[in-house]
Amino acid sequence: MEIITLTEPKTKGKISFEEAIFKRKSHRKFTAENLSTDEISQLLWAAYGRNKYGKVVPSAGAIYPYEIYINLSDGIYKYESDRHVILKVVDGDKSRGLYYAALHQDCVWDAKATIILAVNYEKIKARYGDRGIKYAHFEAGHIAQNICLQAEALNLGSVCIGAYDEEK
């Protein structure tokens, strides 16, 4: 299994938090450039990385039921926050499959990286029952917002995709 060690995340950026909020918008057109390892590192750390208190997003009961994946041109990688690495789990660019699963949204096809949030509902329901699903959705919002704000801080485009075919 291929393992890529990511660069140390930065805790100071080129723009303020307030400016990132002010600039945040959905982008559906992207450049043809691949993301750098530094950019991938920052985005994944902002999504579900670790700080001195635990993870960078809140989670009901500190359960953290999500796994974070990123589709790149050479495959899909799973983010492992404890070691700040990505592990290749699928070979080859899967943009075409993601495009079909996302109901033919061109921005998914065009993106040089797609971050995928995968939830284990049973993990959170074991503690909270059915209301755990609601808590998991809150957590997804925290993760997605961190990704969007980090993308703006890096001068990258991002868009959240909520419409997809769950069977694909």
Image (tube, rainbow, N blue to C red):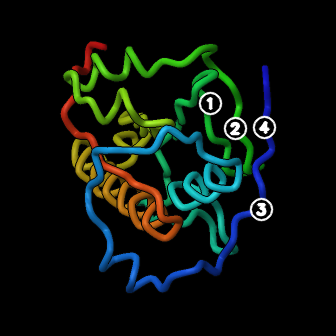
In the image, residue 168 sits, relative to residue 31, either above or below, namely: above
Q: Are dots 4 and 1 in contact, CB under 8 Å?
A: yes
Report which residue position mark 4 lands on. 4
Report which residue position mark 3 lands on. 8
Q: Which amino acid does label 2 sit on?
A: Ile
Sequence-first disc among 2 and 1:
1
Q: Residue 104 vs residue 2: left or right? A: left
x%, y% of residue 109? 36, 27
Q: Dividing the image into 4 quarters, which one contains the N terminus?
A: top right
Circle number at residue 77? 1
Sequence-first disc among 4 and 1:
4
| Residue closest to the far front | 32
Q: Residues within 10 Å of mark 3 (few under 14, many from 20)?
A: few
Q: Are dots 2 and 1 in contact, CB under 8 Å?
A: yes
Circle number at residue 86? 2
Q: Residue 61 vs residue 141: left or right? A: right
Cα separation, mark 2 vs mark 1, equals: 6 Å
Q: Dividing the image into 4 quarters, which one contains the C terminus?
A: top left
Cα separation, mark 4 vs mark 1, equals: 9 Å
Residue at 61% x, 59% y is 42
Q: Are dots 3 and 2 in contact, CB under 8 Å?
A: no
Residue at 50% x, 36% y is 112
Res 73 quadrant in image: top right
Cα separation, mark 3 vs mark 2, equals: 13 Å
Q: Which amino acid does label 3 sit on?
A: Glu
For mark 4, give the secondary structure.
strand
